[in-house]
Amino acid sequence: MADLTPRQIVQELDRYIVGQDAAKRAVAVAIRNRWRRQQLPEDIRKDVTPKNIIMIGPTGVGKTEIARRLAQLVGAPFLKIEATKFTEVGYVGRDVESIVRDLAEAAVGMVRQEQRRLVETQAKERVTERLLDLLLPSSGQWSPDSPEDNDRRSRTRDKMKARLEAGDFEDRRVELSVDQKVAPVQIFSNIGMEQMESDLQSMFEKIMPRQSQTRQVTVKEARRLLLDQEVEALIDRQVVNEKAVALAENQGIVFLDELDKVCGPPAAHGPDVSRQGVQRDLLPVVEGTTVNTRYGPVRTDHVLFIAAGAFHQSKPSDLMPELQGRFPIRVELTDLKKEDFLRILTEPKHALTRQYRELMATEGVTLEFTPDGIDALADVACEVNRTAQNIGARRLHTILERVVEDVSFDGPDLADKRVVIDSHYVHGRLQEILQKEDLSKFIL
């Protein structure tokens, strides 16, 4: 993250997402501010809180895609979750504190990968020695009374080691003792108890004796199993937990999707456990609180929250005023026009047209999209979105799948392996849909 300036982050997002420059700039600045805060003196650093963002825009314009690509860019714990998964504490469903627990899990996964890279060389050396012990059970013995036997065993072991590293024994079978994992603990209750489940699981892992099973496996498989065991033995769990908690607290990013689904007027009858209740529970988590996880308490004061919602049937002002204040930066994403559809079909690194070309190339079929064919696809997508339900760029998936349906089905059996998709071909395949468009509104 330190290597990416806001301009570079926007350029990376531009490779996959068309338009929406305001949203990209806001996200890029927020990510860069995470790095800037780390460079500040300790006394001021603790007072610099992240400026949370809320992205507002219709479905299919790139809100979730920005989050997906952002997760691949930043070297920080990243969690994408839907607000519709939560209910108020005390009711059936997940409570919002599970966001922090999931973020801690993501941080632990990142730190473990980092620690694994550090100890992997040492672990591989230990795996080689253990494999030699399995292949030559007596070669590791040492007798002070017979130096000749010791030299012979040492030479034999060195020869076997050279052959083992050359891959000569990959298919030979050895007998290996493998630890069995403890069965997960499940609690059946009418309230969310994920924390109690994880605590009990951790407790059982500590007090239950490890059960091992002897298996006959190839040297290739044994190397993989032994590497996992040695890496696990070399990694210090306490260090992992401490680093993960610090990483989640200082660099964690949470993308809260579908926020508009928990937005609306208060319920007229009974408690509103999935809307107002969730908003009330989100307040302390977004503002800053301490949540106990299996890796230790995690403070959320400096976790960056990016929320998104279509807000078709509600508006951001329907959120609780306190929650609105927790998201000071608002960005509106615009509807897609025909020009945007044209760019989506051609500009991104893995554009839809390229995806279909590569898919059909596996069958030996050359799929060629002409400029007028791409123009026709964009025109039809824009027109259907205008006259029917506007689902944004997702409409292109529907239309393209219909256009190439026959080629996909007959691809392996086609005599002519070159298919040109031009304007005439597109309108021929979609004519039936366009004619029945009005009628289709009344058919479930």
Image (cartoon, grey):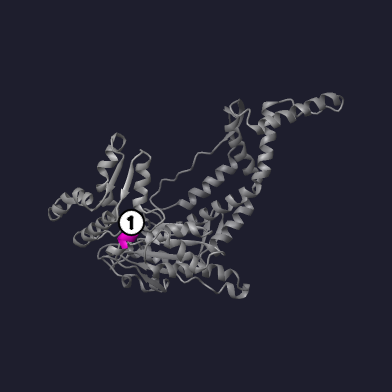
Report the amino acid beneath label 1. Answer: Leu
In depth, the one of 387 and 304 nearer the eye is 387
Number of other residues with Cα within 10 Å of mark 1, as a class: few under 14, some 14 to 19, many 20 or more? many
Q: Secondary structure at mark 1?
A: helix
Q: Along the line of sight, which residue is nearer the eye, 369 or 107?
A: 369
Q: Is residue 372 left or right of residue 195?
A: left
Question: Which x, y percent locates residue 277?
Answer: 36, 63
Residue at image coords 63%, 74%? 41
Residue 420 screen position, x and y as percent: 28, 47
Does residue 231 lie above or below 415 as drawn? below
- Residue 79 at x, y = what percent? 46, 57
Residue 174, located in which quarter of the rendered image?
top right
Whether residue 14 is visible to the viewer of this picture, yes or no, is yes
Instruction: Specify start and end residues of the magenta stretch as a single range.
Output: 340-344
Q: What residue is pinned by disc 1?
A: 345
Q: How many marks?
A: 1
Residue 105 within the segment the image draws in magenta: no
Query: Would you say the magenta stretch is mainly helix, strand or loop?
Result: helix
Relative to residue 45, is residue 342 drawn left or right?
Answer: left
